Amino acid sequence: DSGVTQTPKHLITATGQRVTLRCSPRSGDLSVYWYQQSLDQGLQFLIQYYNGEERAKGNILERFSAQQFPDLHSELNLSSLELGDSALYFCASTRSPMGGDPRPYFGPGTRLTVL
Amino acid sequence: QQQVKQSPQSLIVQKGGISIINCAYENTAFDYFPWYQQFPGKGPALLIAIRPDVSEKKEGRFTISFNKSAKQFSLHIMDSQPGDSATYFCAASVGNTPLVFGKGTRLSVIA
């Protein structure tokens, strides 16, 4: 158990809908990363937050947005869903982006299925 | 542009054999190279990592070999066991930037 929690575990929805994925980082971790894992693309970095502020942006679509709250949990919002958005979404956390142990610890993921 | 290229895509190894997975990178500024192991239905978990100031790191049956001049690094799993069957990802990062992952290798260890 990495200490990172994600809810829900599974999500099935229809095209055009909007969903919210939730992540709680490990205790003490300030930085949260979101990754998308699909069969043909592997793990793609979406976005990173550090202590409530956006720190880095990857291949995140404009239909997707995220935020990190004062209690450090993070939410990833996916809107106008398309079939191609079906994937596993992982959250990962680290203590700090400034030195120290750089390794992110991954949560168990949310499997999103868009029908 | 894929910054970390991983091969092979899948690998079948006999129990007790050596599994070898290779990665090549392009960005010479990368300074952290971890390997992650992922079982079905689980998130990736850090297996072993190396920095470019050493050429090899060993932890139990797992070894990373690093070739800075060739911009390549590899994971060797000695005495492979059925329990090692999983998907393995190499990754790389610069400083504290987010990890860039390879596309993964599905390893099957058969008895």
Image (cartoon, coloured by chain):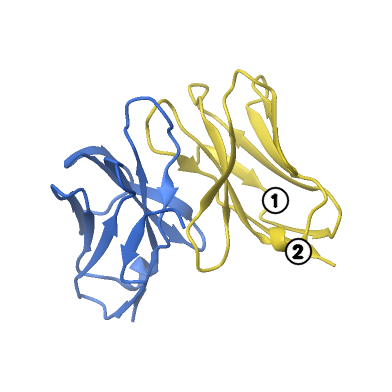
Chain colours: A blue, B yellow
The answer to whether A14 is drawn above or below residue B11 in the figure is: below
The crowding category of the residue bearing disc 1, from other C-alpha atoms within 10 Å (few below 14, some 14 to 19, many at least 20), is some
The structure residue drawn at horizontal position 31% and vertical position 71%, both measured from the top left corner, is A8
Q: Amino acid at mark 1?
A: Pro
User: Looking at the picture, does residue B30 appear above or below residue A5?
Assistant: above
Q: What residue is disc 2 on?
A: B82
Q: Position of residue B106 (x, y in %)?
A: 65, 59
Q: Locate residue A30, reporting x and y percent.
A: 26, 40
Q: Residues within 10 Å of mark 2 (few under 14, many from 20)?
A: some
Give the residue drawn at x 65%, y 31%: B72
Is A25 left or right of B54, judged from the image as shown? Answer: left
Indicate the chain on which mark 2 is placed.
B
The residue at the far left in this view is: A70
Judged left or right of residue A90, residue B66 is right
| Residue at image point 70% right, 58% down | B84
Position of residue B11 relative to residue B100, above or below, is below
Label 2, secondary structure: give it: helix
| Among the two numbered marks 1 and 2 on one chain, the one whose residue lies closer to the N terminus | 1
Question: Residue B91, percent across and down?
Answer: 53, 40
The residue to which callout 1 is attached is B8
Quadrant of image for the C terminus of chain A:
bottom left
Q: Position of residue A7 (x, y in %)?
A: 30, 67
A78 vs B9: above or below? below
The amino acid type of the residue labelled 2 equals: Pro
The circle drawn on residue A18 is: none
Task: State the residue in front, A61 or A5.
Answer: A5
Q: Chain of mark 1?
A: B
Front residue of B80/A85: it is: B80
- In three-dimensional space, the C-alpha distance between marks 1 and 2, rounded to whole angstroms, equals 18 Å
